[in-house]
Amino acid sequence: MAGHGDKPISPQAAAEEALAFFKANADEERAAKFQRYFKEPVNYFGIEWAPFKAWKAEFIGRLKAQWGIEEAVEFCEIMLEDPHMEPRGSGYQVVGAFVDEAEPDLLDRIHGWLEEYCGNWGLVDNLAPSVLSPLLRKYPALVADVKGWTSSPNQWVRRGSAVGFVELVGEGSFRKAAYEVATALLDDKEDLSHKAVGWLLREAGKVDRDELEAYLLDQGPRLPRTTLRYAIEKFPKEDRKRLMEATKKKKE
């Protein structure tokens, strides 16, 4: 149930306020520059980061005084109807601010958002750490469901399964599952999945480098080279060279 602030605001009114901010601060030239980071066409308003960050902090602070998780989800789903990155990302961030109140059934919504409203790595990498990771931390039993996402026909769901463990892999109770997700995605056909797995493994290596190295040597030639490069990025140069050589596919 929502709280009572001085000026209660409905999810619809909050969405209208947010969209008005985005439209008032749009910059077509800045928006066009973001496209170089994506293979897919993306829609940006092109908001400058500093004012956007300040606006978001004030906006979410106001909502926290008045709302609960139900209003946050309603707001998010209104924002997802806009095709631009900023409204969708802000919707995820608002839900993230209330995720400590969420029930396990939020996982189904997260899956749907990944499937229908992400469409690029940027939105996946916003949603997964902001909402999925803390939900898994609260409800570890959901890990089994997320591991199952690795076989989804949707590449953004698959990427989300990996990115969702990036912030959790340092916690012992999640490390085994994180490596299982990584292994399940090694044969993925999408380069963006390979990069996500490499990112996940790199974070695992910060906690236990010996465990990561043993895993990489065990998987050997099965490792996509992109995944391997990301995973060993922080290793000393001589170790990177050794592992790149040790995991090469042998010529017939």
Image: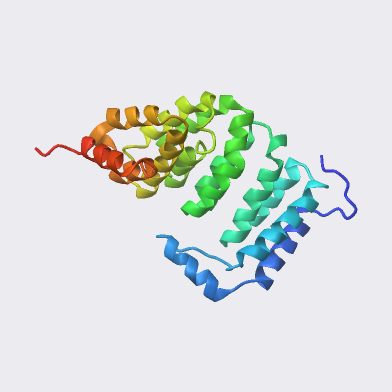
Query: Is the image coloured rainbow, by chain, by secondary structure, or in one colour?
Result: rainbow
Q: Nearer the viewer, residue 167 or 132?
A: 167
- Residue 147 pos. (x, y %): 46, 31
Residue 98 appears in the picture as rendered: yes
Q: Left or right of 178: which side holds 136?
A: right
Residue drawn where x is 82% and y is 43% of the image: 2
Question: Going 51% across and 48% down the picture, which residue do you hit?
Answer: 124
Q: Residue furthest bottom?
A: 29
Viewer-proximal residue among 39 and 197: 197
Q: Percent from the top left, x then y, of residue 196?
A: 42, 44
Residue at 77%, 51% (x, y): give it.
Answer: 61
Quarter containing the N terminus: top right
| Quadrant including the C terminus | top left
Count of numbered circles on the image: 0
Residue at the limit of the structure toward the left, as seen here: 252
Q: Is residue 97 above or below residue 172?
A: below
Q: Quadrant of residue 227?
A: top left
- Quarter of the view holding residue 53: bottom right
Task: Answer yes or no: is residue 80 visible.
Answer: no
Q: Is residue 162 above or below residue 43?
A: above
Q: Is residue 55 left or right of residue 226?
A: right
Left or right? Give the position of 242 relative to 99: left
